Amino acid sequence: MQRQPLVIANWKMNGNRHLTSQLAEALRESGALLNDVSVVVCPPAVLLPAWQSEVFYDDVHLGAQDVNEHHAGAHTGEHSLQLLTETGAEYVLIGHSERRQLYGDSDDRVQAKVDAVLAFQEQKLKVVLCLGEHEHERDNGETFARIEGQLAKALANVSAAQLAHVVIAYEPVWAIGTGKTASPQQAQEVHAFIRNWLQQRYDAAAATVPLLYGGSVKADSAPALFAETDIDGGLIGGASLEPEAFLAICRAAQARRS
Ligand code: PGA
């Protein structure tokens, strides 16, 4: 099954209007790249309107870094699905390890957010479910148990039909922002485990789910990671703030097509 390569930029709490114009221009000038690779940019939510006007006619998709599970109401500082889609978001990251570790996104809350996004009928938003083990879990041989637990909880209410709107990003916590990338073999092993788990649960629908690797992916580490069978692309933090590096990573994903 040929899956379109997918590369997602996660700007976290970085970037500004200037970088928006710079990266949008670099993507506009990237030629055929955007035919072969789906590129999604997740800037801080306040930059979505700036991105929306930059990429309106181009094949660059936008995403949000998080969403509140409620439709509206007294949730100071939060963003609703309605608002995010109005400002162009087609994807939403859910369960990023920084949200889990720093902002209290428990497995229950992750599940509630996944359910809210998939139940939102006005726009077909895609969930990018982020999961991954801590270093001590890897050291104790608990990686697969951790991944399985996160998958089972987050996808508990997700049907095979809804799975068409799910992307999974494997991001080992010890590799995020640390410069320590998982080796292609380590990453492939977990991706194969995820694909298998999805197959057992969802049968044929599992084959369409893009599986991304994230955690210190750089221009030089991307080609070997993206050469692995079950790594369909990447979720890119630090390197997505440098247009040249980000484009090089997208080109590495493009090579999956050849
Ligand atoms: P990093 O971030 O590429 O800076 O490690 C990845 C992520 O957190 O999504």
Image: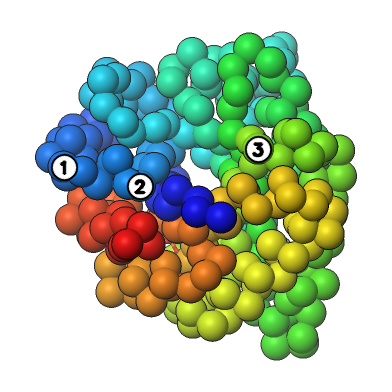
Q: Amino acid at mark 2?
A: Val
Q: Position of residue 20 (x, y in %)?
A: 24, 34
Q: Which residue corresponds to the image point at 21% horizontal and 50% vertical from the top-left? A: 243
Asked which secondary structure carries label 1, the reply is loop
| Residue plotted at (86% across, 38% down) | 157
The tag on residue 37 is 2
Q: Nearer the viewer, residue 230 or 182?
A: 230
Q: Residues within 10 Å of mark 3 (few under 14, many from 20)?
A: some
Q: Residue at x 78, y 62 (%)?
A: 197
Q: Is residue 1 left or right of residue 162?
A: left
Give the spatial CA distance, label 2 vs label 1.
Answer: 11 Å
- Secondary element under disc 2, as helix, strand or loop, is loop
Q: Which residue is mark 3?
A: 164
Q: Which tag, 2 or 1, sits closer to the chain's start?
A: 1
- Residue 31's disc number: 1
Q: Is residue 140 left or right of residue 10?
A: right
Residue drawn at the location 47% of the way across and 34% of the way down: 63
